Amino acid sequence: MKPSDFMLGLLDFLAILLPGAVATWLLTQYLEQLPPGFGYVRDLGTTESPLPWVVVVFTSYALGHFVFMAGSRLDPVYDRWRKRTKPEESDRNYSAARELHHRLTPQLAYPELSTLKWARTYILLHAQPACAEIDRLEASSKFFRSMVVVSALAVAHFLLTVGEPVFAVQSATLCALSFWRYCEERWKMTELAYVTVIVLHDTKVAKADQNGATG
């Protein structure tokens, strides 16, 4: 167990729990009779018992997974954003990683294996410590992807239910910024994976050639 493993687990956990907490708060606004332990969420009251906090944490974690599932629907939107702003034809890192992928692992044998999945699998098998930064960027992108979902729900709540346009505008701004950050973090993650697999493979080849020459 390394400190980096703990941090990655914490980031992944927060990517579920924090958006789930916002979803829990929004849910309590539409419940006439709140279950025990939820009243303080809507009324901002206080309680001395730890049980309500435990209930809300577990509910936030559960709802966070549903928010996460809804957020995965944004992946095709990201793909369209990437093709428009960062086309694959001009991405030399992707082109080199794809060429390496097709050369080492023919697509005919694994048609469902994308270049990104192949690169991450290759790195995991040959240089597992190099996965830490890639995983951190992925966890960060997942967090902001979930924040897009809960921010959009907050816009609908403040605009259509309670009639607070100022809060609706703030939530819409947060939604837009979260989507921008999600795209940027995911882009950084994919580029880092491509660069890492290229450097790792070239380093292995160079070492093999050197050993062959000295042998």
Image (tube, rainbow, N blue to C red):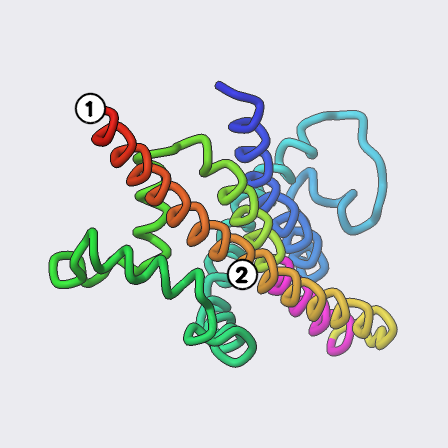
Which residue is nearer to you in this view: 208 or 185? 208
Residue at image x 38%, y 33%? Answer: 127
* Residue 151 placement: quadrant: bottom right
State which quarter of the image contains the C terminus. top left
Name of the residue lying farthest toward the left: 109
> Looking at the picture, which amino acid does disc 1 mark?
Gly
Q: Quadrant of residue 211?
A: top left
Residue 161 lies, in percent from the top left, at 75, 74
Question: Which residue is at 77% across, 77% downward?
Answer: 159
Cα–Cα span, label 1 and label 2: 42 Å
Of residue 215 and residue 133, the one placed in the foreground of this image is: 215
Residue on which the image places disc 2 = 187
Secondary structure, mark 2, is: helix
Q: Amino acid at mark 2?
A: Trp
**How packed is label 2: few (under 14 Cα within 10 Å), some, or many (20 or more)?**
some
- In the image, 9: left or right of 99? right
Which element is circle 1 on? loop
| Residues shaded magenta | 147-160
Which residue corresponds to the image point at 45% horizontal and 31% vertical from the top-left?
A: 129
39 or 200, nearer to the observer: 200
Which one is in front, 111 or 62? Answer: 111
Q: Nearer the viewer, mark 1 or mark 2?
A: 1
- In magenta stretch: residue 188: no
> Residue at label 1?
215
Which numbered disc, 1 or 2, marks the residue that appears first in the sequence? 2
Name the residue: 84% across, 35% down.
46
